Structures are given as C-alpha cells and as structure tokens.
Image (spheres, rainbow, N blue to C red):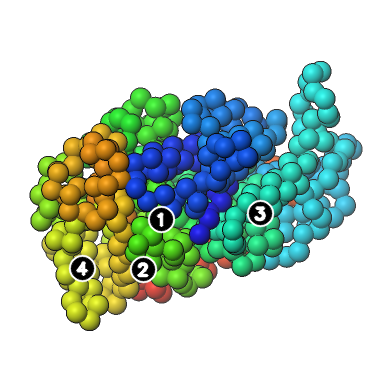
C-alpha cells in the first residue's frame, strides 16, 4: 500500500531526510523490492523518487536537504517553500495570514480564523491582506507576500498529483514537530486538508514533542493546538519526546543501533552532528520509523497489509487512545541464534522508558503492543503453540521490560499481535558483523545482496503506553498557565486565534488524558 510522506517544517524535513536515506539503503540491501512501490516511485526521467513532499515556510532547510541528496530521491517539483517563516507561532502557521489591519484594529471576523477542529473552513488556503510578510527582494519575479499566501493552494495541488501517482488510495504520514510555527501550525492545516480531501485514507503522524524545560517560549501553546488537531484528524500518532530521544542518545548502547557512526554523550540537542546533537536525534527517529514503515516480505500472509493501517487496527483501535510509541532494535554482533530473540527483547527494554519523569517517576504501563519481527530464524523465536496462543511470547515481553520487583509494563489483559517478516532492516556496519548462522537461518535474508550487506534481524515494537498521560497533562498545565497570565496571547490574536480557542483545545486534551488513565487504570491521585 503506497505511503505518501509530508515533511513539514524544519524538524519534519530533517527527520524525513534521514528517514529516506535509511529507506533507500534498506531497499538496496534487501531482496524484496516491495518498498520500491510502497515508499518510492519512478519518475518520468527514469530516476527513483521518494513518495514525499517537502514543505517549509523558509527555504534554508529544504535547500540543504536538496543539496545533500546524492541519490536524487527528492526533486524541486516536490518542494513547497515560503520566505518569511512563521515565528514559532501556531496561529500564523495555521492561518497563513495577518488579520490585523494597518490601523491596528482587528479585522472583521478574525475571531473565527482559528477554528476548533471539525468546523468548516471559511475559505481555501487564505487570501492576501493589507499586511504581508516583511520580506522584500528586488530580484523577485512576483510579490513575495502573494507567494506566501499561495503556499497552501500549491501544496494541496501537489498532494493531489502525488496521490494520482499511486495505484490505489494511499496512506499519508506527516512528519513534524509540535513546538514550532510551521510544523505545528501548517502541519495542523495540512492534516485537516488530508482528512477532508481523502476521507477514506489512513492518516498517520510522527510528532516530535518539545522538552518540558523549553525550546521556545510559545511551545506549550503551539503543542496544545497541534495535539488537538492530531486527535481530531489523524488515525494514529507516533509520539517522540525530545527528552527521551536525548536520553537515549546519551547511552553508549544506542551507538550500535544507529547507522553512520557512533552517538556521542553530550545530548545537548543543539549540535549539528558530531555528538548527541540534532543529527543523532534525527537518525534515531528515522531508525525507529524505518522499522515501522518497512514492508514485510511479499511471501508472508500479511505482507500486503500496510503498516499504518495494521497499527490502527491493532494498537490504536480506540480513537481516544491513538498516541503511540515506537522503538526499533537489532540483535548485537556475535550473538548465537538461540539468543537472538532474548537479546533483542533486552535491547528493547533498555530503550523504552520505564518511569514517567513528568508524573513523579510513576511506573509506565503498556495497554497494547504490536511486535514486527524481521529476519529471525525459526529456531530463535519461542514457539507460540498449536492454537496460535502467544502466551510464551507475551511472557518474554513482560520479562524483558519489567524488572524484578517492579510493576509490570504490560497489563494482564494487554493485546499483543506478532507480525513476522522475512526481510531485516539494514544497519550499516553492525549488520556486516552479524553472525553467519543468523544470516543463513533467516528466511530470505541471505539472498538480499552480497554477504557483507545482508540485513540482520530487527525487532520493532509499537506500543500504547501510559507515558502519554504525563506529556498531555504537563503540556496543558503549562499552556493554561500562560493563558492565565495572558502571556504571548497577543501574538495568537494577531493571527485570529483567541485565548478561548486555546483553552478549549487544552480541555479536550485533558479528556484524552482521562481516557488514557481509564485504559491504564491510573487515577489522578496516584500522581
């Protein structure tokens, strides 16, 4: 099932660049070419192109992605850029216009410009007003302010053309962050359009949540509005916490999981690639998404089932609890076949947080999980029994994630669905060190390419965990505190979003957090 990726904002484009580099490397290493039709397409010039669109309100990041694209996966026809940015303002990114007149008063009807999810749009992509972005260039062939306001119309047309390249109804994946203006605001607008234009398509989002300490002053307001739109329009949301990603990148054990070099221990989140910075975080997110998106082998009975739709049916079947967590690990080098499965489970346990630091280190529980196992020999996976009972697998999962004496991370009645594939996820130098017995025992893995590049066994978990509660309640608490203090709300009002709209979105997220508390049997006083 084809998947169209929409990379919105700086974070979305940087993560998308790392993601398609991983997918292209995996496609070259695997024998099964199913991903070439699901995640790539062949352009009229005979070159392979990624099924994606690059969107940003300033050209710097998109231009750097195109400059670093050595394989020609992206073309300028897939890029939609502005020139002025959105100033870390969700309202500006969503509305794409300035609703304040030159006299300083609010334009008529501005209060409804930032409407709540589910209401009809007042217009198309928004039209030009008296005040446009403060950007002037004597070499421009068109008024820059007019270009800014046509980004959405051009993007919607690009989405339609990309969907027409697919054989059937595609899946959509939105890559963005919740803290900025372009990723959160324009991402919300794009998500709203996808639901209206493709009502039967499955829409997923990979959202990067900001640290509680703060990346931008308005990040809590932006995150509350973006999360409310994700809850209203997306079918499944893969949440990535910046803090959890930084903590993972500080561990030396994560270096073996990432391609292209080791991970440093600085974890500052502001570096450009040498140690524990943004480059490492982007690669870790791409690594986890690759394990989720990479199609299963076509010979498998479930090989044609899209990963996004499969996740919606199994782990995010309840529309109130669609915020999920995903991690991908590989077996370590020189591990015998009999220990591959246990080694992968231990690696998962070391990556997945066990305590929610946003709720006083409360134990994190898992209500449902889906495991995607690729490239494992039959002798490595514990038998599930004649009747399809996964009791042994479920017990191994609990044992790997829950330390002795601690609360179990899986509820007793948690659902677990196992999907087995024959193609592993390539992992660079680490895959080349995989034991020869494992490469020979994995069905189909040995014929991927040369022996030095054979994909190794990989295990991906997609889980519905209680860590979302702390994220939602903490974000809402900080956003309501800003509303009570009337801080930064004038920047929202300038672009048509009132404090009442923010409060309404915040209370809707509290309802979602309440649903998660019921599913995970956690009462408020336990915090």
Q: CA distance from mark 3 to mark 1?
A: 21 Å
In this figure, which residue is indicated by the disc labeled 1?
295
Q: CA distance from mark 1 to mark 2?
A: 12 Å
Report if the CB atoms under discs 1 and 4 are less than 8 Å apart: no
Of callouts 1 and 2, which one flags the residue occurring earlier in the amino acid sequence?
Answer: 1
Of callouts 3 and 1, which one flags the residue occurring earlier in the amino acid sequence?
Answer: 3
Report if the CB atoms under discs 3 and 4 are less than 8 Å apart: no
Q: CA distance from mark 4 to mark 2?
A: 20 Å
Residue at x 24% of width, y 47% of height: 446
In this figure, which residue is indicated by the disc labeled 2?
301
Residue 80, quarter of picture: top right
Circle 2 crowding by C-alpha within 10 Å: few under 14, some 14–19, many from 20:
few
Report if the CB atoms under discs 1 and 2 are less than 8 Å apart: no
Q: Secondary structure at mark 1?
A: loop
User: Which is more toward the observer, 209 or 282?
Assistant: 282
Q: Is residue 422 left or right of residue 406?
A: right
User: Which is more toward the observer, 423 or 473?
Assistant: 423
In this figure, which residue is indicated by the disc labeled 4?
393
Residue 140, quarter of picture: top right
Q: Is residue 318 left or right of residue 258?
A: right
Q: Secondary structure at mark 2?
A: loop
Q: Secondary structure at mark 3?
A: helix
In this figure, which residue is indicated by the disc labeled 3?
164
Report x, y in % for residue 39: 49, 49
Q: CA distance from mark 3 to mark 2?
A: 28 Å
């Amino acid at each position: 099932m084809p998947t169209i990726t929409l990379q919105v904002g700086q974070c979305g484009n940087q993560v998308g660049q790392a993601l398609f580099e991983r997918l292209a490397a995996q496609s070259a290493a695997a024998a099964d070419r199913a991903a070439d039709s699901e995640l790539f397409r062949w352009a009229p010039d005979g070159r392979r192109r990624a099924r994606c669109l690059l969107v940003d309100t300033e050209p710097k990041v998109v231009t750097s992605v195109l400059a670093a694209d050595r394989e020609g996966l992206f073309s300028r026809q897939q890029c939609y850029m502005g020139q002025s940015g959105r100033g870390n303002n969700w309202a500006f990114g969503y509305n794409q216009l300035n609703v304040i007149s030159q006299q300083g008063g609010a334009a008529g009807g501005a209060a409804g410009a930032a409407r709540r999810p589910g209401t009809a749009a007042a217009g198309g992509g928004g039209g030009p007003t008296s005040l446009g972005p403060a950007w002037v260039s004597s070499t421009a062939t068109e008024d820059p302010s007019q270009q800014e306001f046509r980004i959405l119309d051009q993007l919607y047309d690009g989405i339609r053309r990309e969907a027409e390249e697919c054989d059937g109804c595609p899946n959509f994946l939105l890559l963005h962050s919740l803290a900025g203006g372009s990723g959160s605001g324009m991402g919300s607008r794009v998500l709203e359009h996808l639901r209206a234009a493709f009502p039967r398509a499955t829409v997923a989002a990979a959202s990067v949540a900001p640290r509680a300490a703060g990346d931008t002053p308005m990040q809590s307001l932006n995150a509350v509005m973006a999360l409310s739109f994700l809850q209203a329009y997306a079918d499944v949301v893969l949440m990535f916490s910046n803090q959890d990603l930084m903590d993972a990148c500080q561990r030396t054990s994560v270096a073996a999981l990432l391609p292209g070099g080791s991970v440093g221990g600085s974890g500052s989140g502001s570096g450009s690639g040498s140690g524990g910075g943004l480059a490492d975080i982007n690669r870790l997110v791409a690594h986890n998404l690759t394990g989720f998106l990479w199609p299963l082998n076509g010979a498998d009975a479930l090989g044609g089932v899209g990963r996004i739709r499969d996740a919606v049916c199994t782990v995010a079947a309840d529309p109130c609890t669609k915020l999920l967590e995903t991690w991908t690990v590989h077996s370590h080098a020189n591990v015998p076949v009999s220990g591959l499965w246990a080694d992968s489970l231990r690696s998962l346990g070391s990556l997945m947080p066990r305590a929610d630091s946003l709720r006083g280190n409360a134990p994190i529980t898992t209500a449902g999980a889906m495991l995607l196992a690729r490239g494992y020999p039959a002798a490595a996976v514990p038998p599930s029994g004649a009747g399809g009972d996964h009791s042994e697998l479920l017990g191994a999962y609990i044992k790997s994630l829950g330390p002795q004496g601690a609360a179990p991370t899986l509820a007793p009645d948690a659902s677990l669905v196992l999907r087995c594939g024959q193609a592993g996820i390539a992992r660079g130098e680490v895959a080349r060190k995989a034991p020869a017995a494992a490469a020979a025992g994995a069905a189909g893995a040995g014929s991927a390419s040369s022996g030095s590049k054979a994909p190794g066994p990989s295990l991906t978990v997609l889980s519905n965990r209680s860590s979302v509660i702390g994220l939602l309640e903490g974000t809402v608490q900080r956003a309501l505190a800003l509303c009570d203090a009337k801080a930064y709300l004038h920047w929202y009002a300038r672009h048509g979003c009132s404090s009442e709209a923010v409060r309404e979105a915040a209370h809707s997220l509290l309802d979602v957090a309440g649903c998660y508390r019921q599913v995970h049997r956690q009462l408020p006083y336990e915090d």
